[in-house]
Amino acid sequence: DMLARFDLSSVSPQTYNKTEAERRQTMQINNEALAKILVDYTPDFVGVQEMDSTFQKPFNNFLKIIKETYGIEYSIVLTKANGATNHSPIIYRSDKYKCDYQKFTPVSYAKNPTKQKETGELEYASGISSAKFTSLTDPTKEIAILSAHWHWEKEIASGTDNQYYDAKEMEAVINEIAAKYPNAKIFSTGDFNSHRYSGKYLRIFLENTDGEIASTIAKKNGVLKPSFQHINQYIYHIIGKKGTFDVLLHQGTDNGSKTLTDHQPVFADIKFTK
């Protein structure tokens, strides 16, 4: 039963906050760090944020190397959205699942993509990627993954108006998928720029979607692996519907991820309870 237990990760390479020269200098390091996460943890799905076109294009070569070397096949969905590069694509094990639905929803404050002078391409820095997958061995097993990058403000603890739109529109995406695919298990990943309890709009989002953060369950289960950030400092979260899943392991991906991002990518081994 491939979907009774699966692995999910959320990571934010944060490449577009750098200059073109800085991106090219660190691109190889970032690619290697993300590829190492795929090889070391072999997650079924990865929600990625802040991954611009400079990063995406060469990363496909790493996916080919992983397939040739380790026999693990990964694919990326939603690298392009509405004619622009999407910074929040989803990586998945295409040797275990097929993607049969995908959609990108730009948030209200970011509906006009900005043009990157270095690449000459339109790029969506913020938005919500969603995709539904079906197990290749059992077509009755369906899972939907969301990847989002919420707006950043200095006053993260109190929330912001932009985060209000992030939360409301992500909630709408979840409701749309639930109506379209009632049997699919839905999980949200993202750089929420909000801590577990101090983020006002994150709390509202959890209440409105009946959601629960995987790290919270892991702490209760005693399977929260120590890492270089305290659990309350996490702003990357994996969220599922309360009472429908259990967490067998939750940890920060410490293997080189300090060069990959300024925060902590997270990994969870998840098991469905209903």
Image (tube, grey):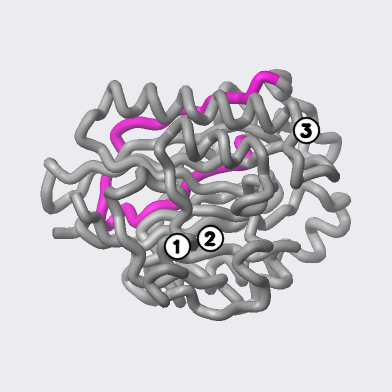
Q: Which of the 4 image quarters holds residue 227?
A: bottom right
In primary-sequence order, the first of circles 3 and 2 is 2
Q: Does the magenta stretch include residue 103?
A: yes
Residue under pointer 3: 120
Q: What element carries label 3?
A: loop
Q: Which residue is drawn at 45% across and 62% down?
A: 64
* Residue 190 horizontal/vertical position (percent): 56, 47
The reply to whether the C-beta atoms of the residues labelled 2 and 1 are less than 8 Å apart is yes
Q: Is mark 2 on a helix, strand or loop?
A: helix
Question: Which disc number belongs to residue 52?
Answer: none
Looking at the image, residue 4 sits to the left or right of residue 232; the answer is: left
Residue under pointer 1: 64
Q: Which of the 4 image quarters holds residue 117?
A: top right
Looking at the image, residue 69 sits to the left or right of residue 161; the answer is: left
Residue under pointer 2: 61
Q: In which quarter of the image is the N terminus?
A: bottom left
In primary-sequence order, the first of circles 3 and 1 is 1
